[in-house]
Image (cartoon, rainbow, N blue to C red):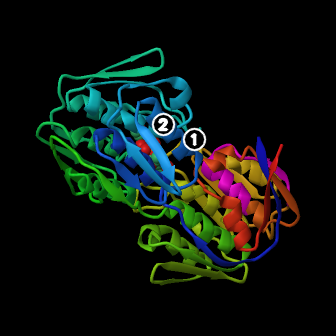
Amino acid sequence: MEKYVINGGNKLYGSVDIQTAKNSVLPILAATVLTDEKIRILNVPEISDVNNMVKILIRLGCKAVFSGRDLIIDSSSADCFEIPSELAHELRSSVFLLGSVVSRFRMAKIAYPGGCDIGLRPVDLHLAGLKRLGVQITEKNGYILCKCDKLTGNEIMLDCPSVGATENIMLAAVRAEGCTTIKNAAREPEIEDLQRFLNAIGAKVSGAGSGTIKIEGVKKLGGCEYLPIHDRIEAGTFLVAGAMCGGEVEINCSCAENLSSLLHKLRENGCNIYIKNDKIVLGSNRRLTSVKSIETQPYPGFPTDLQAQITALCCICSGQSIITENLFETRFKYASELRKMGADITVINRSAFVRGIDRFKGATVVAHDLRGGAALVLAGLAAEGRSEILYISHIDRGYGAFEYKLRKLGADIVRVAV
Ligand code: UD1
């Protein structure tokens, strides 16, 4: 087990390179099972979710090797359609493999997925979508069993625009017979990225980024070299760090357009932000004001994956804020940890009521999940005195080289074995 030790109070200055998006790379890795030809994914992030997905692919019989930060996958030798619980429990995205594994083997047996404990996280929409394509599904002893003679295109209406269900259905449909239409599809940029990747290997997918996605099934898919988009959530986390600590940070990424809802709120807080070529520059040199209210929504609304970080920022703004979480039920576990650092924050049902304090005070706190853990690190960086953040394995799931990047900006943060 490891922890972060942070001496807070340093302003942040300098530039930071943003990794490729975790939420693009994971479904793209799941998609590699669909083809026998080699795929090279460029600049893969150094995070444990990717390492766990690679372990699962190897278990399925795929060959996966790193060449620097590029990952080369050869699924021609894949011969297994089962993902056991010890692997699936490490990673929510293991469920994305249902679509591609059943497409390849006409069978799939996958243990219920794990991932962050941020709510119920059902998979009913994934399963209902696969059923519409002709998959028979049974659930037994913690496993989802899928079987079909063939996959046949169909029209699928999602009850809500689930990111994972949209991606899973896309993966199952690309090699199905006939056309599939997904209505009320999620519109996240990572879904557009998955479409770009699938089309690069020969699929016929259109409409991603809108609420209707059309997939014309093809018989065979090929190989490609692919660079995923930048991680808008990592970029957003560094922007909030800059806002909380003061100074000037330059974020090297081409995802400003995908961060409009955050940039809008940070400007409302009083940050100076400008976008120049592939950089977002944020300067903040005075106490910021509260943003009154924020509600998480599916894209292009305010992302749930930045809710914890912006709430930490609101804790040290002047005035009051109400932050409402509409996607996941238990995504405020970090609030009681922020209270240990002096925050005035009360959670009632799905909303956090925050009254701004002048500064956090250093404390020992526990990371319960990935984004909540990142928010605690930001609070530690802005705090007066020394903080310890425990259970940072949650943070390692999604932020590669987090402390190196923060140190490069001038933060005093080290990783220590416990
Ligand atoms: C993905 C992202 C995660 C992000 C989330 C919302 C990845 C690897 N993870 O997660 O970082 O926080 O989108 O932007 O891309 N739902 C159902 N039934 C289902 C599926 C979902 O009711 O079968 C509900 C969920 O409970 C939740 C909402 O739909 O309330 C959104 O979940 P979803 O978009 O599916 O999130 P994930 O794909 O799990």
**Disc 2 marks which residue?**
121
Query: Looking at mark 1, is its residue's CB closer than 8 Å to ligand 1?
Result: yes
Query: Looking at mark 2, is its residue's CB closer than 8 Å to ligand 1?
Result: yes
Give the extent of the magenta segment.
362-378
Question: Residue at horizontal 20%, vertical 27%?
Answer: 134
Question: Residue at horizontal 66%, vertical 73%?
Answer: 242
Q: Which residue lies most toward the right here?
A: 385
Examine the structure image and report whether residue 304 is included in the region drawn in magenta: no
Q: Which of 315 and 376 is in front in this view?
A: 376
Q: Residue 95, percent across and down? A: 42, 35
Q: Which residue lies most toward the left here?
A: 178
- Give, as a three-letter code, the residue at label 1: Ile
Question: Residue at horizontal 45%, vertical 83%?
Answer: 277
Residue 7 seen in the current view: yes
Quadrant of the rendered image containing residue 60: top left
Question: Residue at horizontal 53%, vertical 57%?
Answer: 68
Mark 1: few, some, or many residues within 10 Å (few <14, many ≥20)?
Answer: some
Quadrant in which the N terminus appears: top right
Residues at badges 2 and 1 in contact (C-beta under 8 Å)?
A: yes
Quadrant in which the C terminus appears: top right
157 to the left or right of 339: left
Q: Nearer the viewer, residue 129 or 87?
A: 87
Quadrant of the rendered image containing residue 219: top left
- Give, as a three-letter code, the residue at label 2: Arg
Q: Residue 263, percent across and down? A: 51, 73
Q: Is residue 150 above or below residue 276?
A: above
Q: In this view, does 140 lie above or below 26?
A: above
Mark 2: few, some, or many residues within 10 Å (few <14, many ≥20)?
Answer: some
**Disc 1 marks which residue?**
118
Q: Which type of secondary structure does the marked residue at label 2 adopt?
A: loop
Distance Cα–Cα, label 2 vs label 1: 8 Å
